[in-house]
Amino acid sequence: MSGGGDLFEGSAAKAAFVNDTPPKARSSASKAGSPPPGEAGYTASAIEVLEGLEPVRRRPGMYIGGTDEKALHHLFAEVIDNAMDEAVSGHATFIEVEFEADGFLTVTDNGRGIPVDPHPKFPDKSALEVILTTLHAGGKFDSKVYETSGGLHGVGVSVVNALSERLEVEVARGQTLYRQIYERGNPVTPLETIGRVHNRRGTRVRFRPDAQIFGADGVAFSPARLFRMARSKAYLFGGVEIRWRCAPERAGDTVATEATFRFPNGLKDYLTNDLEGRELVVDQIFFGKIRKPGGHGSLEWAITWLGGVEDGFSSSYCNTIPTPEGGTHESGMRMALLRGLRDHAERVNQTKRVAQVTADDVMTTCAAMLSVFIREPEFQGQTKDKLATLEASRIVENALRDAFDHWLAASPAQANRLLDWVVDRAEERLRRRQEKEVARKTATRKLRLPGKLADCSNAGAAGSELFIVEGDSAGGSAKQARDRATQAILPLRGKILNVASAGRDKLAANQQLSDLAQALGCGVGSQYREDDLRYEKIIIMTDADVDGAHIASLLITFFYRQTPRLIDAGRLYLAVPPLYKLTHGAKTVYARDDAHKDELIAREFKANAKVEVSRFKGLGEMMPAQLKETTMHPAKRMLLRVAVRDDNREQTSDAIDRLMGTKPEARFAFIQERAAFATDLDI
């Protein structure tokens, strides 16, 4: 209680630390009837008692979160939520929303109408007046009246009344029309009986927010926002029709002046509309609706995953009330999706791949719509931004998980594509975390380069080259053959890790790939930075045999998966070392392969000349002078630039997944399809 706090601070604190009067003197003065300084003005008359709706006008932020644009539109949410409760309960089939030129907003439904008979506890007032002038008065406290509703919001419509300059309410019940007018929360007319009506029933609330609260020249209703809010309600309950009208002066070019919303497919239509034209990971939206999950009202959902680098989103509702901060129902959805994917991974023998996957990885690019209807929901705060009902988590998880399992099992190809996508998100998250840790550890230290790297002396990237060489022996020859000013050598031992099939843990623990990433200096994955690349050209130099081609393929896969922009920038090359040395007398030439060998023999030497043919077993066998002359000297060598054509990117990605990925059956099928072309088998 604020009074107690003020009394303690005003008397005890000041008496002990401010008043210089000795304790005995203060005691005497107190006995004489003179209160200590600070207490004289603090009497019973200083205690205010706010009645009716006055607390709402004094402290609107306590009830609607403030006086900004969001809070203003919450007034509309409270009124239309009452109408939606009538529709969800089966008593209303349509709701009309009209935004008038003079700033009045009207919401009409064809439900039962607010009761107008005298209230049992307040016989001199109608139930309508009690609801509009008393906090915590309404029909949502009794589940017999509303099986599910937008919370115990008897607070809601009374708050709208308190914060409105004028509010007019009409009720049609029993073929009779009633009307009452309020200003700033107070009734200015009695409940009037207008007359008989035969084709009308329900409640009509017309109000204009008070400029004293929201500012005369400040916050105003946004037609576009009202339009979206009204349309979203129609998506949330397929059995209701919402009719929208807006004065042309208010609508302008932003929204339609008239529209009718009715969406039989509910949230599926909602999500499909929001995702129009956007890339998706899976072809079909995972959607459904279950009535009476856990004995409660209903559960509806529509979920898919966005492709590319776009972040996902989730929109959740409880009894048609938006919950922008999520809550227990969203927690249940997250766990259902995570556990469903883990179960699918176990069914297809991919358990190890999902060991590091979290619910955040599943939801990173997930676009989800979730709506629950439950009895007596509990929210955090008056504006109901977050659902707090603990049981909602269990209800949603149990119902959604079974449906998700069936959906994944019905389309294995789609399920596997989703699994691969989520695993990639997990690996990306772990990679970013590791790179941040490395950056933090090395931020204050001098740049460290791999021990086996023989760097060039050129200070900048322009004109410099990094040769990635197969084996220490070849690396030794290359170091002697290089131009020390512009050519750096990084030898790798044997075949590197296949990054297309390796998990995040193996990738992080591989020393050779770590050395390569350090030598490049530009980071990998999402942390790739073009400006930090330390070399103008990256040249893969491997033996001119099958093993060398395999190593080159593994390296290209690494660059394609970890630094695709390096390839797009034209920085990656393949060296073309010779396979044969052809000698006759004083003449020596080098051939790249068998066909080139035959061509050179026919062109460079006389007919019937006895040409000595020597086959290099590897780069390590070549003398440094030979390696420089044939493979490393810029004026004499041949380089093949690695590139991905814009019209062939999808096929390239599919080929790498098929030949280098985690599924051996895909490679087996590739071999079977091309078995007829294998003619040089040595059996």
Image: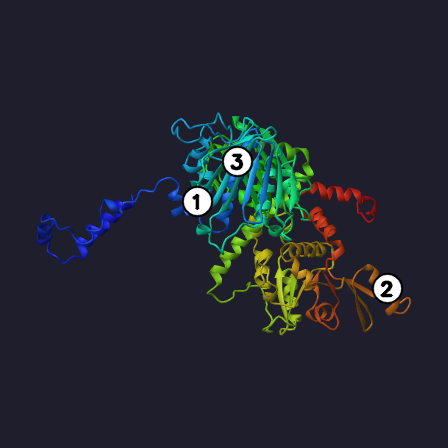
Q: CA distance from mark 1 to mark 3?
A: 17 Å
* The image quarter in which residue 488 lies: bottom right
Secondary structure, mark 3, is strand
Q: Nearer the viewer, mark 3 or mark 2?
A: 3
Left or right of 590 on screen, residue 169? left
Q: Amino acid at mark 1?
A: Arg
The numbered mark, 1 or 3, whose residue comes first in the sequence reads 3
Q: Residues within 10 Å of mark 2 (few under 14, many from 20)?
A: few
Q: Residue at x 68, y 60 (%)?
A: 567
Q: Amino acid at mark 3?
A: Glu
Residue 628: where, in percent of width, then height?
A: 70, 70
Residue 184 - label:
1
Residue 7: where, in percent of width, then height?
A: 23, 48
Residue 355: where, in percent of width, then height?
A: 55, 42
- Residue placed most toward the observer, 156 or 530: 156
Residue 170 - label:
3
- Residue placed most toward the observer, 344 or 542: 344
Secondary structure, mark 1, is loop
Residue sitting farthest toward the right:
607
Q: Is residue 109 above or below residue 9?
A: above
The reply to whether residue 620 is visible in this rendering is no
* The image quarter in which residue 416 lies: top right
Q: Is residue 643 above or below residue 633?
A: above
Residue 599 - label:
2
